[in-house]
Image: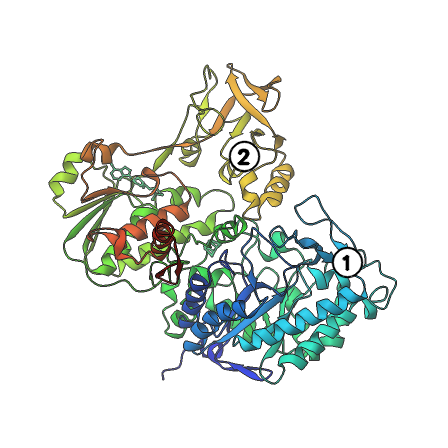
């Protein structure tokens, strides 16, 4: 086999009793699938193994009903049924020659047990993360029971076929509560000195080894910089590592600041941001080390391995955005990597209790339900397609159709391909978002049968004259100027002040002096535009109908950093206020609760409220009652203004389904399952698998 400069990344690495085929390691990450969607989960993890990830792990996997993170779909290993569920995943991972890892987890005081209704347990009685109730302080019997549950689930993990079993004393969950100086107020042998606080952790390591040691490796996910001085200082953390290092076969290093650093978005943190915190720990533990850092650059990966910082390249998000990243590096096709843009839309969906989706990878989560492969589409296209609009939706549709074998023309009124991502990626912190365009454009430019027409706005007659067999309209949406949106269902009356929209600012038409940015959208754009104006020298008032800046970005883990960033930039933040009007030199506000009026002197108003779908061309072609055949269809923001992830998904779906009689070309198993259960209910029966059983 030819050698490549990245060969070092493809060396097998021994982890205790098992050997990973290479250095690519998908660390535990949430999926929004967990125990709820085992087939979807298994197919998704299996796809990563096919793509070359040498180790593929579960998400946090509950060992007992007293650790129930409902409504977040965590994995579970409570009983023999869970063993069967998770065996689907290990089989899928093993089929591709990779190792399967499982992160055994108990949430301690953090979880609320909304579904199981058991009292949560903790080192002391503390409030649950989100609910107004507390955990029960564990006594010795509880500790013995917990150790037994952990051991039993380790045995179940082995029975399910896992090769790597985690002990997990991090991220604020139960075992880290015991390590914590402040939370652990016990006076028994589990409290007080570091030795005592670490007793439970050591016991779990020894008991897990005893349960699975001859067959499975033991990994520990551990915070490289302690847990903050109130809990475990970095000195204590290092002392502990030195002592227990050899008790595990692999150390998976993370950092204490989960949202601010480990899981931070590209708006706030760059690739490999905490390398300096990991460096040196490998020598301390004397075991193989894995760590993450949103790595997408093969050169960074190679450097980290060569310099001995890590043995494995850990990844969650880069493996979601491109399950075939390792294969592309091995085959020297680095230009084909679909790089993660660091937006955390994946995480947000898990947070909402929904299956993972990815801005860059529209097939993620659809491997089982729709039989979508991230790299392959059936080559069954025949004829010509005109795609109007080269934003994320149009680009993805064009790429998928070209892969199917259609002759594709992609047209855009702009002189540059990319639609909204071109404009948005120029805003503060959003630079990596251009990868949405770059990946697709790079692929299209290397494909035969693809033509690009830029710089000309197409009319309905131009589209008809073009004479394509199929037409896809992806003309996007424009930000409204009249203030309509979530709070105001009709236009704001009497805005006598100069009003700007996000589109104005993104095309370089910006106000100066004192400016009110009115955010009724609640995601990133309002805060990012406020920052843009503050950096340009404006005195900015950020006004939102929500109770904090960029409220929805709570789900992407960015809210705190967003608010901090605005405050540091000198932006004045006004929450729970709606704009109700404006004179020539002031914006009128009202409290969203009481209606109490106030006024902000200002020279301009920027309204970030909602968007108008640009369906002019689509309607000119099909009218209000489009024909059923869908030879002309609208996708993306012109159909439904939404996230970039929605637009990419719509483009992919349209690309896959074009020319097929119905959406049934993708085996939509959730729909099939739902209709089977409807039928069963009507017949008074039940459904097992795909079969309706009549009573
Ligand atoms: P989406 O997110 O749905 O892909 P975007 O707003 O990112 O939507 O992209 C829409 C693209 O469509 C823009 O680049 C815009 O220039 C282009 N566009 C809109 N109307 C026309 C038209 N009539 N002819 C050609 N291109 C158009
Ligand atoms: Fe990366 Fe965004 Fe995809 Fe998550 S959703 S993997 S952050 S591109």
Q: In the rendered structure, which disc, 2 or 1, sits on the residue that comes first in sequence?
A: 1
Left or right: where 166 falls relative to 341 = right
Q: Secondary structure at mark 2?
A: helix
Tell me if residue 676 comes above or below residue 210 in the rendering.
above
Q: Residue at x 36, y 84 (%)?
A: 1
31 and 329: which is toward the camera = 31
Is residue 306 in view?
no
Query: Hey, which quadrant is residue 439 in on the image?
Result: bottom left
Q: Secondary structure at mark 1?
A: loop
109 and 287: which is toward the camera = 109
694 and 417: which is toward the camera = 694
Query: How busy is the neighbourhood of tag 1: few (under 14 within 10 Å), some, or many (20 plus)?
Result: many
Q: Please state the horizontal and vertical placement of residue 193, each as a whole percent of the image.
A: 85, 66
Q: Which residue is mark 1?
A: 231
Q: Which residue is mark 2?
A: 530
Q: Please state the horizontal and vertical placement of residue 84, each as a whole percent of the image.
A: 49, 70
Q: Residue at x 58, y 83 (%)?
A: 215
Left or right: where 595 falls relative to 676 = right
């Amino acid at each position: 086999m030819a050698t490549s400069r990245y060969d070092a990344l493809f060396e097998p690495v021994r982890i205790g009793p098992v050997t990973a085929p290479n250095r690519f390691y998908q660390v535990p990450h949430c999926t929004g699938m967990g125990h709820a969607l085992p087939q979807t989960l298994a197919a998704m993890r299996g796809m990563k193994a096919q793509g070359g990830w040498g180790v593929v792990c579960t998400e946090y996997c509950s060992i007992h009903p007293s650790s129930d993170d409902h409504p977040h779909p965590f994995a579970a290993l409570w009983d023999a049924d869970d063993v069967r569920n998770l065996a689907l995943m290990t089989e899928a991972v093993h089929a591709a020659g990779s190792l399967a890892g499982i992160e055994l987890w108990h949430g301690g005081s953090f979880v609320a047990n909304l579904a199981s209704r058991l009292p949560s347990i903790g080192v002391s009685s503390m409030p649950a993360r989100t609910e107004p109730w507390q955990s029960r302080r564990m006594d010795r019997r509880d500790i013995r029971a917990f150790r037994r549950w952990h051991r039993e689930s380790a045995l179940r993990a082995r029975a399910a076929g896992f090769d790597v079993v985690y002990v997990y004393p991090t991220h604020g969950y139960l075992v880290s509560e015991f390590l914590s100086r402040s939370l652990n107020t016990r006076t028994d042998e589990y409290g007080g000195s570091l030795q005592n606080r670490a007793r439970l952790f050591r016991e779990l390591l020894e008991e897990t080894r005893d349960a699975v040691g001859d067959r499975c490796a033991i990994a520990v996910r551990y915070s490289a910089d302690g847990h903050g001085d109130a809990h475990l200082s970095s000195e204590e953390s290092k002392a502990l590592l030195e002592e227990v290092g050899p008790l595990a076969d692999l150390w998976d290093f993370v950092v204490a600041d989960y949202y601010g650093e480990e899981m931070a978005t590209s708006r706030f943190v760059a690739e490999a941001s905490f390398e300096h915190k990991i460096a040196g720990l490998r020598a301390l533990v004397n075991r193989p080390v894995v760590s993450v850092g949103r790595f997408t650059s093969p050169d960074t990966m190679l450097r980290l391995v060569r310099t001995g910082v890590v043995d494995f390249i850990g990844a969650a998000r880069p493996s979601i955005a491109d399950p075939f990243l390792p294969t592309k590096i091995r085959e020297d096709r680095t230009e084909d990597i679909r790089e993660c843009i660091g937006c955390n839309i994946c995480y947000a969906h898990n947070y909402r209790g929904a299956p993972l989706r990815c801005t860059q990878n529209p097939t993620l989560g659809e491997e089982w339900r729709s039989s979508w492969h991230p790299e392959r589409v059936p080559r069954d296209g025949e004829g010509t397609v005109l795609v109007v609009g080269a934003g994320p939706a149009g680009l993805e549709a064009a790429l998928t159709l070209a892969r199917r074998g259609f002759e594709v023309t992609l047209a855009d009124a702009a002189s540059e391909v990319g639609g909204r991502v071109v404009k948005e990626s120029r805003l503060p912190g959003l630079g990596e978002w251009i990868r949405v365009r770059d990946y697709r454009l790079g692929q299209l430019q290397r494909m035969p049968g693809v033509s690009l027409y830029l710089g000309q706005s197409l009319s309905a007659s131009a589209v008809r004259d073009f004479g394509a067999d199929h037409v896809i309209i992806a003309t996007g949406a424009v930000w409204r100027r009249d203030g309509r949106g979530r709070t105001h269902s009709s236009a704001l009356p009497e805005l006598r002040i100069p009003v700007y929209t996000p589109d104005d600012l993104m095309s370089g038409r910006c106000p100066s002096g004192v400016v009110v940015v009115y955010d009724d959208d609640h995601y990133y754009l309002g805060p990012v535009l406020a920052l843009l104006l503050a950096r340009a020298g404006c005195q900015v008032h950020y006004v939102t109908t929500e109770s904090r800046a960029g409220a929805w970005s709570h789900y992407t883990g960015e809210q705190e950093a967003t608010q901090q960033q605005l405050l540091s930039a000198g932006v004045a933040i006004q929450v729970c206020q709606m704009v109700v009007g404006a004179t020539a030199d002031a914006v009128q506000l009202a409290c969203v609760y009481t209606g109490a009026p106030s006024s902000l002197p200002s020279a301009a108003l920027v309204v970030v409220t909602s968007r108008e779908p640009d369906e002019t061309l689509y309607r000119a072609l099909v009218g209000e009652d489009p024909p059923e055949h869908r030879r002309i269809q609208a996708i993306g923001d012109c159909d439904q203004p939404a996230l970039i992830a929605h637009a990419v998904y719509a483009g992919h779906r349209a690309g896959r389904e074009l020319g097929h009689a119905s959406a049934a070309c993708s085996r939509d198993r959730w729909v099939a399952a739902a209709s089977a259960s409807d039928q069963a209910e009507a017949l008074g029966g039940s459904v097992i698998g795909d079969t309706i059983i009549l009573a």
